[in-house]
Image (tube, grey):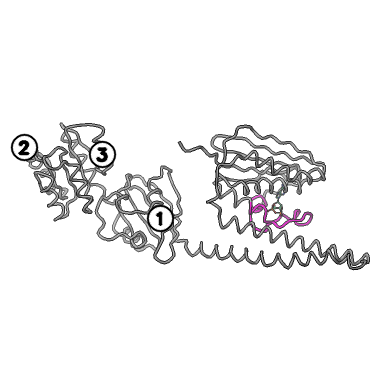
């Protein structure tokens, strides 16, 4: 037998007695009854019941007004509304208020009992030992049913989201927590949404890496990881790199300046001129490295706030123009094919230009004189695709996944070409912030194609 306590609120005595005596009690439920909203309110405030079933049309207070009043007083008991009037607007109001089911008279008894059993069945289908484990886990865990009714939160989650025991059974998550990102994650229609949840505290804040999984027969489980310290360390590192790069560039500029002056204060011997050139080359390399480090740390600190609908073809054209001299110096052939009327991308124009420019520069650098470079931009489904191909030295298969790492350069590149090994890390960082993907297809000694896929931006309607 079931054993749950149900409060039935119905003004018509016959119906009330029929439902109680003939239907609910034989099923093993404990039943309390009320003849109107005020009486029901008094009972529900006084004792804990598992389910309230209320008629809509009652004198003094409708079933919905009762529900509203209960919520106002912090009682979130699951609620089933019975009504003789099957109007859509009433149904909508009822759903908004969070009724768990909506039954129209006259109803089938089996249907009614089914609805009651369903609403009462939101208990966690998880064994006690596993619940204990979840409770003790260091990472916050939150479980709801498919419709976002609260089922479980472990100790850490309760502390973080300020949930005070006892949490009313079957309460909708919306009525329980105010945290917008957490709610958004549960209401996301994605199959496995991931969110970064930032919880402000009196002192500082906590950042959680959260992901949600839908488990059939259970509901939604959100597992979160506290990454506050990681984020903090990352930020400190970026700040350190930024300030070091700035501080080092100033003396380098002075060195460069004085080297330029050497020849003006007196003639240099051939050997002195050679030494001077060596120093200049080294200083330029260090400056390039510092510039790249600075760029990388800027990209790593993020620039989410600066994203705007951006037309990528204009940017690609601009990137090509800024590199045209180098291309002509090396006598390389260039073909450009940019599709018209492409959808924009939600992006940062300066950073996107950096992506295109970096790829074009690499293509020029790693392709011998007389080779060809091909730049293409087109739309495909929900994506804008940029493709930069060259007929250069290519990249060995075992290097292809490593070139995105900071400072990684292939042996051939390191031996024959100048570079910092940071360009593609910057490019990948930028593509990531734009929610895109980048990869390379390449055959050594034949050439490489870098492909960037960015989500197209659709105006919100
Ligand atoms: P850098 O060019 O300064 O070395 P990147 O991060 O831009 O740094 O590139 C990393 C490595 O990837 C390069 O050193 C090179 O080995 C390889 N690479 C990048 N682009 C190309 C290309 N178009 N053709 C061949 N190799 C490339």
Between disc 1 and disc 2, the foreground one is: 2
Closer to the chain start, of discs 3 and 1, is: 3
Residue sitting nearer the eye, 396 or 375: 375
Residue occupied by mark 1: 223
- Is residue 391 visible in the rendered image? The answer is yes
Horizontal placement of 33 versus 434: left or right? left
Helix or strand or loop: what does disc 2 sit on? Answer: helix
Tell me where residue 455 sits by quadrant.
top right
Q: Is residue 288 above or below residue 251?
A: above
Q: CA distance from mark 3 to mark 1?
A: 33 Å
The residue drawn where x is 37% and y is 61% is 160
Residue sitting nearer the eye, 277 or 348: 348
CB-based contact (under 8 Å), mark 3 and mark 2 = no
Q: CA distance from mark 3 to mark 2?
A: 28 Å
Closer to the chain start, of discs 1 and 2, is: 2
Horizontal placement of 71 versus 443: left or right? left
Q: Determine which of the numbered discs, if any, sits on residue 14 in the image.
A: 2
Tell me where residue 17 sits by quadrant.
top left
Circle 3 Cα neighbour tier, 10 Å, few/some/many (<14 / 14–19 / ≥20): few
Residue occupied by mark 3: 93
Q: Is residue 278 above or below residue 180?
A: below
Pointer 1 residue Cβ closer than 8 Å to ligand 1 = no
Asked if the stretch drawn in magenta spans residue 14, the answer is: no
Q: CA distance from mark 1 to mark 2?
A: 49 Å
Helix or strand or loop: what does disc 1 sit on? Answer: strand
Q: Is residue 57 above or below residue 48?
A: above
Horizontal placement of 106 versus 223: left or right? left
Asked if the stretch drawn in magenta spans residue 407, the answer is: yes
Horizontal placement of 71 versus 425: left or right? left
Rendering coords of residue 179 (x, y %): 37, 54
Closer to the chain start, of discs 3 and 2, is: 2
Circle 1 Cα neighbour tier, 10 Å, few/some/many (<14 / 14–19 / ≥20): some
């Amino acid at each position: 037998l079931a054993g749950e306590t149900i409060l039935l609120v119905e003004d018509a005595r016959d119906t009330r007695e029929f439902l109680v005596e003939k239907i609910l009690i034989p099923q093993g439920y404990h039943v309390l009854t009320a003849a109107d909203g005020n009486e029901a309110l008094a009972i529900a405030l006084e004792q804990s019941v598992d389910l309230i079933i209320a008629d809509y049309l009652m004198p003094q207070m409708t079933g919905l007004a009762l529900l509203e009043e209960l919520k106002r007083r912090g009682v979130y008991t699951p609620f089933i509304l019975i009504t003789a009037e099957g109007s859509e607007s009433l149904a909508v109001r009822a759903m908004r208020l969070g009724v768990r089911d909506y039954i129209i008279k006259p109803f089938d008894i089996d249907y009614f009992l089914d609805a009651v059993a369903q609403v009462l069945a939101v208990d966690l289908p998880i064994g006690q030992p596993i619940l204990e484990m979840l409770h003790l886990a260091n990472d916050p865990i939150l479980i709801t049913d498919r419709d976002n009714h609260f089922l479980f939160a472990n100790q850490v989650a309760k502390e973080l989201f300020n949930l005070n025991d006892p949490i009313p059974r079957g309460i909708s998550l919306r009525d329980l927590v105010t945290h917008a990102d957490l709610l958004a994650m549960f209401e996301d229609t994605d199959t496995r949404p991931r969110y970064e949840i930032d919880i402000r505290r009196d002192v500082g804040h906590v950042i959680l890496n959260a992901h949600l999984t839908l488990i059939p027969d259970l509901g939604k489980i959100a597992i979160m990881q506290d990454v506050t310290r990681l984020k903090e360390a990352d930020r400190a590192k970026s700040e350190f790199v930024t300030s070091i790069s700035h501080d080092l560039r100033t003396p380098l500029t002075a060195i460069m300046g004085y080297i330029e002056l050497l020849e003006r204060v007196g003639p240099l011997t051939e050997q002195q001129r050679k030494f001077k050139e060596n120093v200049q080359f080294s200083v330029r390399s260090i400056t390039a490295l510092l510039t790249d480090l600075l760029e990388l740390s800027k990209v790593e600190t993020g620039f989410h706030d600066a994203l705007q609908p951006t037309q990528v073809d204009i940017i690609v054209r601009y990137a090509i123009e800024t590199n045209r001299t180098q291309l002509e110096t090396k006598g390389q052939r260039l073909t450009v094919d940019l599709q018209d009327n492409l959808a924009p991308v939600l992006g940062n124009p300066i950073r996107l230009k950096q992506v295109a420019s970096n790829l074009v520069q690499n293509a020029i650098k790693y392709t011998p004189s007389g080779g060809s470079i091909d730049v293409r931009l087109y739309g495909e489904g929900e994506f804008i695709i940029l493709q930069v191909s060259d007929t250069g030295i290519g990249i060995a298969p075992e290097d292809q996944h490593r070139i995105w790492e900071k400072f990684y350069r292939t042996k051939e590149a390191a031996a024959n070409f100048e570079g910092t090994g940071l360009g593609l890390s910057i490019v990948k960082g930028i593509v990531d912030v734009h929610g895109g993907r980048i990869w390379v297809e390449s055959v050594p000694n034949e050439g490489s194609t870098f492909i960037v896929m960015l989500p197209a931006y659709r105006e919100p309607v």
